[in-house]
Image: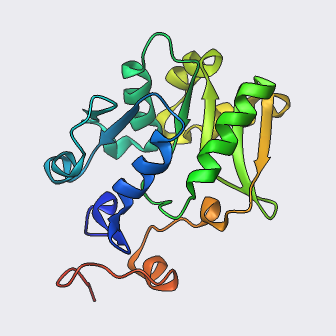
Amino acid sequence: MGFPKPLLKVGNETFLERSLRGMLEVTRSVIVVTGAHRERVRAAVPSTPRVRVVHNAHFRRGQLSSLKCAIRETALDADAALVHLADYPLVEASTFRALGDKFGSVGAQILIARNAGRRGHPVLFARSVFAELMAAPDDQGARFVVNADPERVVYVDVDDPGVSLDLDTPEDLRRAGISLPAGEEKG
């Protein structure tokens, strides 16, 4: 992207602010994992005891390496980890709530948000799969664990197209009606 995704804006909120607002409605705490643009992202994280920042020095290994950093920091009494990526900023707060509610009622090991038959993000992993996530190959991502046993995966159907709207490139942003900050356009 050439710009820190968490600091891009939807309306008046950064991707980071929007995601934190939705997640903090459901979780006791949130761990923000930084990679590239470490200092800029850290500076944008609100100062609250419910949000901690950890840095993934090996972020180039992929998303799973960041998830592993978060799992290492997860409180010992956490029942699960609700995993959300910065490049899915249009996920509604109600989607985070739906995953939390479903986890509380069915106790599944892995819950994945799905809209109109398309699975996406966020994903909730029960503590019982943390060790598997930690042992999974970084280059295969969390899908390695998700695909290992489809019987333990529960899809949570939501009326939220944001769960499958991955904003990775400037073109993705344009299609979603979001602009890079002035001076950041490339090409």
Q: In terms of depth relative to the viewer, which is nearer, 80 or 174? A: 80
Q: Position of residue 16 (x, y in %)?
A: 35, 54
In the image, taking residue 60 as reference, residue 82 lies left or right, namely: right
- Judged from this view, the residue extending furthest toward the front is 25
In the image, taking residue 2 as reference, residue 104 lies left or right, namely: right
- Judged from this view, the residue extending furthest toward the bottom is 187
- Judged from this view, the residue extending furthest toward the top is 76
Q: Position of residue 87 (x, y in %)?
A: 45, 60
Coloration mode: rainbow
**Image-quadrant location for residue 91:** bottom right
Residue at image position (78%, 44%) is: 155
Residue at image position (64%, 51%) is: 95
Q: Position of residue 20 (x, y in %)?
A: 40, 47
Residue at image position (42%, 54%) is: 86
In the image, taking residue 40 as reference, residue 178 lies left or right, namely: right
Position of the C terminus, as image quadrant, is bottom left
Tally of marks: 0
Position of the N terminus, as image quadrant, is bottom left
**Image-quadrant location for residue 128:** top right
**Does 176 appear above or below 57?**
below
**Does 167 appear above or below 75?**
below
**Does 133 appear above or below 1?**
above
Q: Position of residue 83 (x, y in %)?
A: 52, 39
